[in-house]
Image: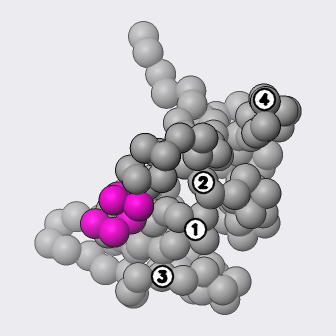
């Protein structure tokens, strides 16, 4: 059986991404070691150090920058996280200075969602896990 072990999100600056994803979002740093001019830098969900890792991947190629910008300009999330209470998470993150693209919303029978900027060139979506 396959399981998701690692996903990546492109970031403009790994140091800035590390600070945002750990200090603001609350993820725990899992791995951090040099690879060439960059780092292999992963984070995991709070309290789930053995769970799926998110690689904060540096943009090493021009096509990666083009892709990231196209996804961002289209208003699409580069990554999506679950929350038990999106409205409470929105309030917590807003108080920490996170820029949201609007208030949390629910469309028809879909979960409550909110979209915010990670400051590293990406939009991040949170949805309410049921």
- Real-space Cα separation, disc 4 to disc 3, in angstroms: 33 Å
**Mark 4 crowdedness (10 Å alpha carbons): few <14, some 14-19, many ≥20:** few
Q: Which mark is residue 70?
A: none
| Front label number (4 vs 3) | 4
- Real-space Cα separation, disc 3 to disc 2, in angstroms: 18 Å
Earlier residue among tags 1 and 4: 4
- Real-space Cα separation, disc 2 to disc 4, in angstroms: 15 Å
Residue positioned 70% across, 83% down in the render: 96
Q: Which mark is residue 11?
A: 2
Which residue is most to the top? 1
**Mark 2 crowdedness (10 Å alpha carbons): few <14, some 14-19, many ≥20:** many
| Front label number (1 vs 3) | 1
- Magenta region, mostly helix, strand or loop? helix
Q: Which residue bears the numbered disc 3?
A: 100
- Real-space Cα separation, disc 2 to disc 1, in angstroms: 9 Å
| Front label number (2 vs 1) | 2
Judge by depth and name the residue closer to the eye, 74 or 130. 74
Q: Are marks 2 and 1 in contact (CB under 8 Å)?
A: yes
Judge by depth and name the residue closer to the eye, 73 or 52. 73
Earlier residue among tags 3 and 2: 2
Residue positioned 60% across, 41% down in the render: 60
Earlier residue among tags 2 and 4: 2
Q: Which residue bears the numbered disc 1?
A: 118
Residue 65 percent location from the top left of the image: 48, 52
């Amino acid at each position: 059986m396959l399981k998701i072990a690692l996903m990546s999100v492109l970031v403009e600056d790994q140091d800035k991404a590390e600070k945002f994803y750990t200090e603001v979002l609350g993820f725990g740093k899992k791995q951090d070691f040099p690879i060439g001019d960059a780092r292999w830098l992963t984070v995991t969900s709070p309290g789930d150090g053995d769970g799926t890792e998110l690689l904060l991947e540096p943009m090493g190629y021009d096509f990666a920058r083009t892709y990231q910008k196209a996804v961002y300009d289209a208003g699409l999330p580069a990554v999506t996280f679950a929350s038990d209470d999106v409205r409470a998470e929105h309030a917590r993150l807003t108080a920490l200075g996170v820029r949201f693209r609007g208030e949390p919303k629910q469309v028809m029978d879909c979960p409550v969602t909110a979209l915010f900027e990670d400051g590293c060139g990406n939009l991040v979506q949170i949805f309410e896990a049921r």
